Amino acid sequence: MNGTDHLDPLLFGEIDPPQRLLMGPGPVNAHPRVLRAMSADLLGQFDPEMTGYMNQVMALYRPVFGTGNRWTMLIDGTARAAIEASLVSLVAPGDRVLVVNFGRFGLLLIEILTRIGAVVETVEVPWGEVVPLDAIAEAIARTGPRVVATVHGDTSTTMAQPLEGLGALCRAAGALAYTDATATLGGMEIAADRWGVDVVTGGLQKCLGGPSGSAPITISDAAAAHIFSRRHVEKGIRGDANIDGVGPRIASNYFDLAMIMDYWSEARLNHHTEATSMLYAARECARVALGEGLDARFARHAAAGRAVTAGLRAMGLTVFGDDAHRMTNVTGVYIPDGVDGERVRAAMRDHFEIEIGTAFGPLVGRIWRIGAMGYNAMKHKVLLTLGALEACLLAEGFSLPAGEAVKAALAAWDA
Amino acid sequence: MNGTDHLDPLLFGEIDPPQRLLMGPGPVNAHPRVLRAMSADLLGQFDPEMTGYMNQVMALYRPVFGTGNRWTMLIDGTARAAIEASLVSLVAPGDRVLVVNFGRFGLLLIEILTRIGAVVETVEVPWGEVVPLDAIAEAIARTGPRVVATVHGDTSTTMAQPLEGLGALCRAAGALAYTDATATLGGMEIAADRWGVDVVTGGLQKCLGGPSGSAPITISDAAAAHIFSRRHVEKGIRGDANIDGVGPRIASNYFDLAMIMDYWSEARLNHHTEATSMLYAARECARVALGEGLDARFARHAAAGRAVTAGLRAMGLTVFGDDAHRMTNVTGVYIPDGVDGERVRAAMRDHFEIEIGTAFGPLVGRIWRIGAMGYNAMKHKVLLTLGALEACLLAEGFSLPAGEAVKAALAAWDA
C-alpha cells in the first residue's frame, strides 16, 4: 500500500501555492527580491562570474556574522547540514564535547555528536531558561572539553542564550566554540569575533528572509587550522594531491569543511557542484539585510517581538519563558485552558491564511509559537496576526477584552 | 591575508550573470520553467499544500526512476549529498562493499565508503571502458559484499555502465545494489525496478535541466527495511519515540534515510526544514520531463550525442573512450597535439559565451568534455557549439575541413 499511488503526475499543474502569511517559528515568507534572484540563469561551476559571486558571498556574510573570518561561506543544504558539517569537522570520535543545552536544538547537537562518536557532556537548564555563564565556566572546568557547542536562539523554547564571554572561557581552556545561530542570524546581533566563537552557522529561512536550502557558516582561523589538520584530498581530482593532514580523517565527505574551504579558496578544488540558485538567494538575503542596515534590522525584529508580546498579554494570555532572555523574533504563548490549540491554528490558516506554530517535546499542546522574522517582522503583519488570533479565540468561546491586543501592539511597536 | 577583503559588500549590484551557454559536463542551463517555479512564495513545512507538493514529487519521480518504489523523494543537498545519504544509511562500519569503479565518481564512492568505515572491494577497468557483467559477477562471488555500488554514467570518462541484470546478481548473493545516476537521470533510461537496483540517486543539474541543490532518490522496500532496522528517533521531537531499530545507528543525522523517510511519510516526523524553493524546482524538472515524454527525451539526448560525435569527427578530432558504451549526453574528445586546451576553452567563453568542459585526474589537459543535457540537448545549441569550436581551433592554427562539422552534425541529428 502506497499513500501516493493514486496520484497521476501528468495531472499536476503549475506551482501555485496559496499566499499564506507564515508567522510561525520558520520557515517564513521570503523577501520577493530573494525569490526573484533565484530565477537568474545558471553559470558554470568555475566560470569567473560564478567564482566572483562566491567571493561576494564571502564578503557579504562577514558583517552578517560579525566577523572578519576569511572562511565565511555557504554549506549546500539546510541549516541542519551546516550544524553537522561543523561538528563532524571539528570533532573526532572520542573527543569530549560540552553541549550547552536549553531546548530541542541543544538535543539535536547532542544527537549529532553522539553519532560522531564524541564523548558528550552537558550543562542544562529547564526549557524556558538560559544557561548562566558561570554554570558554563564550571562545566568547562569539570569536563575539560575539546569543543563547546551551543545554540544561540532555540525556537523550541524561544530563548536566546547570552554568549558574551564564551570565547574567552573556551580559549582559556583550550577548547573551540561552536554556535548554531540558525534562528537568529540576520534578526539578532551575531558577534562571532567579539563573542570569540570559532564556528557559527545559520540558515536563510528565518530572519534572513530566504528559502531553506543554503546555510551560511563562518570559521575562525584557529578552527580552520584544526580542520585542515584533518584534511585528506579526494582521489581523482588532481595528480599532486599530497596535502593530506595528520589528524583523524573527517567521517563525512560532503560535510568535510577542509574540502569545502579548498573549494571556496583560490585553489577551487572540486568538491560538490555549488547550488547556484541557492547561492543567488543567499547573496540577495545578505544584500537586503546590509542594505537595510543590521542595526535597523535588529531594531525592527525587537519592535516586532515587543508588539507580539504586548498584544498577547493584552488578550489575557501568558507568554512562555524567561522574560529577560526571550528571542525577539519568536514568542511562545500558553494555549488557554479549555481552548483546542490545533483548532485555533486550523482556523487561523483556513480563514485568515495565517500560519502560527505548534511546539515540540514537553511543550506540545501547551504553547503556540508566533514568529515575526525577516520580511515578516513588519508592523502590519504583526497586527493582522494578533487581530486574527483574537477573532479565532473569541470564536472558540474564550473570553478576552476585544480590540485591546492590536492597540497594545501598536503602542509597543514604537516603545 | 584575505583574498576577498578588498570587496565592499555595499557595492554589489543585483544578480546579473552573463547569458552563457553551458555545454560542459554539467551544471547546464536550467529550463526557464524551472527557474520561474523557484520564485513561487514559500509554505509552512507542514502546511497541507506543502505536504501535498511533497507527495506530488514522490509520484513525479517514480516514472523518472523507472520504479514503483514508495520511497521516492528528495535529499536536500547536491547530488553528492544523496550519494552519501545512501551509502551511510545502507552501510555500517565493517560492512563489505563492492564498488564497480570505472572513473572519478567510482573513486568518490570508494572515498565516501572509506570514511564510513566500510571494507571496500573493487572491480575496475581503465578510464574509458565499462565493467563487463561477468566481471561484476566474479567480483561478487569473490568478495561476498553486503552492498554493490556503481555509477551509471560517469562524466569523468563519458562512459555509461550497463546495469541490466545487476540486481539479479545482487539478490542471488544477498547484497543490496546502489547506483549513482546523477549524470544520466532524465537523459538516459533509468530502470531501477527492471535493473533490480535498490537505491538510485540523481541530481537536477544535468539532464533534468535544473539547478544543483536538490537530489532525487528512490529506495526499494528491501533497502528501506534494512535502513529502518537502523532507525533511532531524535530526542525532543515527540514523547513516545520508541520505534528504535536494532541495527547499528546511522553515523549521520542529516543523511539518516530512516528519518528522512519518516519525514516524507504520513507521520511527517520533523527532521530538516525541507528546501521549499528547490522542491519547487525539482517538481518542475519532472513535470517538464514527463510532459515531453521520457522516450522522446531519451531520443533527443541520443540525437544530440550523435550530432556532437559526428561533428567532432568531421573536424578530424578523436573522440574519447569505448564507442559502444558512450553516454549520450556528454562526449569526450582529445585535445589535438599542439593546441592549448585552456586557450580554446577561454576563447569559446570570451568570444562565444559558450562553456565546454575540462577534465579530471589522468585526463586533465588531454580531453575536453562537451555536454548536451536537459534544456541544452537541442539541435541549435549543438550546432552553435560545434561552429564556435571550429572557429576557435582555426584561430589556434589547427588545420581542419571548414564547414564539415556542422554539416555532419545536422545529418547525424536525424540519423
Image (spheres, coloured by chain):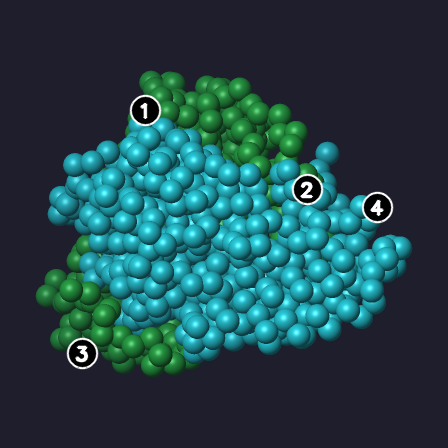
Chain colours: A cyan, B green
Front position in the image: B111 or B174: B111
As drawn, is B350 to the left or to the right of A4?
A: left
**Chain where mark 2 sits:** A
Question: Mark 2 = which residue?
Answer: A364
Q: Amino acid at mark 3?
A: Ala
Nearer the N terminus, badge 3 or badge 1? 1
Question: Mark 1 = which residue?
Answer: B119
Question: Where does residue A354 sit, x and y in percent of width and height?
Answer: 72, 63
Question: Looking at the image, is mark 4 or mark 1 nearer the viewer?
Answer: 4
Disc 2 is placed on an element classified as loop
Q: Amino acid at mark 2?
A: Val
As drawn, is B16 to the left or to the right of A141?
A: right
Question: Looking at the image, is mark 3 or mark 1 nearer the viewer?
Answer: 1
Depicted B383 relative to depicted A191: above or below: below
Badge 2 and badge 4 both on one subunit: yes
Which residue is at a point 57% across and 25% down the rendered structure image?
B244
The answer for how far apart the CA atoms under marks 3 and 4 are is: 82 Å
Disc 3 is placed on an element classified as helix
Do the residues bearing badges 3 and 4 touch, measured as CB atoms within 8 Å?
no
Disc 1 is placed on an element classified as strand
Q: Which mark is residue B395?
A: 3
